[in-house]
Image: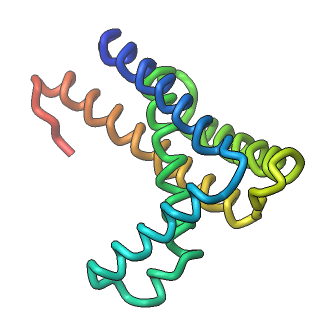
Amino acid sequence: MPDRFRRAAAGALVAYVGLLAFVLGQTDASLAISVVGRFAHVLDLAGAPGALTTGSRAEFVLNAAMFAPLPLLAALTFPRHPWANWVVYGFVGSVAVEVVQALWLPLRSAQYVDIVANTAGSLIGAVGAVMIQRAWTARTHWGGKVHV
């Protein structure tokens, strides 16, 4: 991938880490509760089955979606790391977030299911990066056309 693409991914990664630090560092859970409730309501309005619109399931999906951009952008910024490393880093980072919430943010709740959701999001992001890298490689090797 060209250096300008990697620099753009690095800039997006830095910005996203800052946004994530802001969201995860909230001292109370009101923002998270509000977002989960609104997302569950949108799913309900869209006609999703009731089993998928519960708060806990909506929260799981949002946690996975929140973590997916990290390994995606990191893998595009640092392409020499294997994709599985980014999943492990996501797991370790998720454990760290939950420990901080458990020890220093008493109004937040540390939950094992959040670690699972965040790690799943890390897997999705890492696989997404592999797909982008392979498409780029195919494009450059096959005369500008992406062959999947």
**Residue found at x 23% / y 31%:** 138
Whether residue 30 is situated above or below residue 139 in the rendered picture: below
Along the line of sight, which residue is nearer the eye, 11 or 79?
A: 11
Whether residue 9 is situated above or below residue 145 in the rendered picture: above
Whether residue 68 is situated above or below residue 72 in the rendered picture: below
Q: Position of residue 148 (x, y in %)?
A: 21, 45
Along the line of sight, which residue is nearer the eye, 22 or 85?
A: 22
**Residue found at x 34% / y 9%:** 3
Q: To which quarter of the image does residue 2 belong?
A: top left
- Judge left or right: residue 38 versus residue 132: right
**Residue found at x 62% / y 35%:** 21
Along the line of sight, which residue is nearer the eye, 17 or 129?
A: 17
Along the line of sight, which residue is nearer the eye, 79 or 109?
A: 109
The colour scheme applied to this rendered structure is rainbow
- Judge left or right: residue 81 versus residue 5: right
Q: Position of residue 48 (x, y in %)?
A: 34, 83
- Judge left or right: residue 52 versus residue 18: left
Q: Position of residue 69 (x, y in %)?
A: 46, 41
Whether residue 61 is situated above or below residue 143 in the rendered picture: below
- Judge left or right: residue 50 versus residue 74: left
